[in-house]
Image (tube, helix red, strand yellow):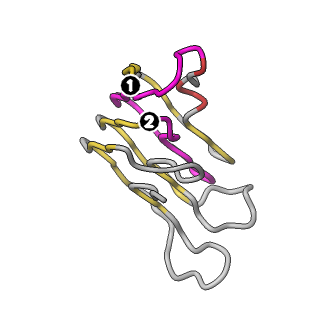
Amino acid sequence: MQMSAILVAADASSWYESGAVTDMSILDNRFVNCGSPGHSVIRIAPENKHHHASVHRNIRITGNRFETTGEDWLMARSTEGLIFKNNVIRMQEKYDREGNVPLDERVKLEACIGVDILCNDLKYDDLN
């Protein structure tokens, strides 16, 4: 089983051993076949029970290259000011293009505000 390449957590519900991210840039990385079902390439997953307030803030994911066979690129929960911009995404699909999922379905958001997803370059490479 493959895990997320980057995990941003925060113990916001029990021992409080780690804190919130208030300013983070994920910039100019190459992610090759990272992630698996339930574990997106980049996962922002604070351990909070109440989703009415953001835990993390100001996370920018820009200028990266994702080379994947169908995993989600980003999953974020309880985050404010999230930017996913100017990334190159190369999907190596094993199936017909008609079954491919659009970009916005590869990014999963829960209780996030102030999110910008724009100017990403998505192309499919055929593995058949």
Neighbour tally class for label 1: few under 14, some 14-19, many 20 plus, Cα within 10 Å: few
The magenta stretch spans residue 121 = no
| Relative side of 24 to 56, left or right | left
Q: Is residue 18 above or below residue 31?
A: below
In the image, 39 versus 46, the foreground residue is: 39
- Nearer the N terminus, badge 2 or badge 1? 2
Residue located 41% across and 22% down the image: 128
According to the image, label 2 marks what residue? 69
Q: Amino acid at mark 2?
A: Thr
> What whole-number distance in Å separates the C-alpha atoms at marks 2 and 1?
9 Å
| Relative side of 31 to 105, left or right | left
Query: Which residues are the magenta region?
Result: 70-98
Residue located 51% across and 65% down the image: 9
For the residue labelled by badge 2, is the local secondary structure a helix, a strand or a loop?
Answer: loop
Residue found at the very far top of the displayed protein: 98
Neighbour tally class for label 2: few under 14, some 14-19, many 20 plus, Cα within 10 Å: some
Q: Is residue 88 above or below residue 17?
A: above
For the residue labelled by badge 1, is the local secondary structure a helix, a strand or a loop?
Answer: loop
Residue found at the very far left of the displayed protein: 28
| Relative side of 83 to 46, left or right | left
Question: How far across and how far down the image is residue 31, in percent?
Answer: 32, 44
Q: Is residue 37 above or below residue 64?
A: below
Q: Amino acid at mark 1?
A: Leu
- Do residues under tags 2 and 1 come within 8 Å of each other at their CB atoms? yes
User: Nearer the viewer's eye, disc 2 or disc 1?
Assistant: 1
Q: Is residue 91 above or below residue 77?
A: above
Residue located 62% across and 55% down the image: 54
According to the image, label 1 marks what residue? 127
